[in-house]
Amino acid sequence: MIHNDKRICDGVGLWLENRTDRDWDGLPGLFLDRDGVILEETGYLGRVEDVRLVDGAARLIGWANRQRIPVIVITNQSGVGRGYYDWQAFAAVQSELDRQLQCDGAHVDFVVACAYHRDGKPPFAIDNHPWRKPNPGMIMAVRDQCRLDLSRSVLVGDKWSDLEAAARGGMARGLLVKTGHGVQQAGIPPSFDAGSMGIDIAANLDEALAIFKQETSGASG
């Protein structure tokens, strides 16, 4: 199964889409998990009619846009690998996400996704693929293409596996938000070594935004 869509960078199961011509060399990035963080968790989201922004997502992304911080969506998509929907459906969901963000003047700069999963259907049946979180492959692919400074970058996720990927990618910060799976995850201690990466837990994206604004203000003050 080989796709001609150039965004599927290996022709099968890896989506890599840089949407900007900006020079990101040395900049920090804001990495966001998609389902449960930006979009309401529905379980294997493959239908446009099920696309609903999480409250606060457009405000957080719009703030990063105004700060000229690159916004990167980084998402495991085993639904593609399992055959529940295809890359065309994934792209349609992304387009609707973009449309809803644009209504609030916000946009995403980069989208990365991995469809490989141990329970996937061939050719997606790969266990522990380097790109699948908690592995850091998607993060490193963005760094390699855009030369972001991961040591100053932040990832927001609703699962500890998101934050583990951030830690293994050498990020400065990981923030677990209590949306999607986050409520349950916050009650479980992380099972990985975060090393020097700072970890915060926020009730929602507006609280996450308040944390980022405070830190930005402190850094510039």
Image: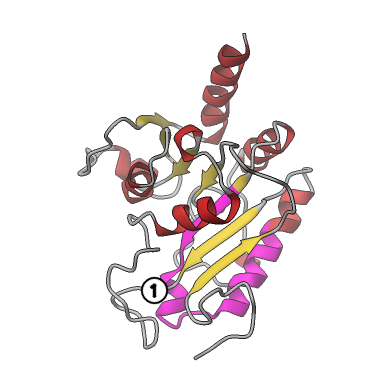
* Front position in the image: 148 or 47: 148
Who's the residue at 70% across and 45% down the image? Answer: 23
Label 1, on which residue?
116
Range of magenta residues: 72-97
Q: Is residue 175 left or right of 60 when viewed as pictured? A: left
* Residue 3 in picture, x, y percent from top left: 58, 86
What quarter of the picture does the C terminus occupy? top right
Q: How many marks?
A: 1
- Amino acid identity at mark 1: Tyr
Q: Position of residue 48 (x, y in %)?
A: 65, 69
The magenta stretch spans residue 107: no
Residue 34 shows in this picture: no
Q: Is residue 220 above or below residue 134?
A: above
Q: Is residue 181 above or below residue 208?
A: below
- Mark 1, residues whose alpha carbon is within 10 Å: few (<14), some, or many (≥20)? many
Camera-nearest residue between 147 and 7: 147
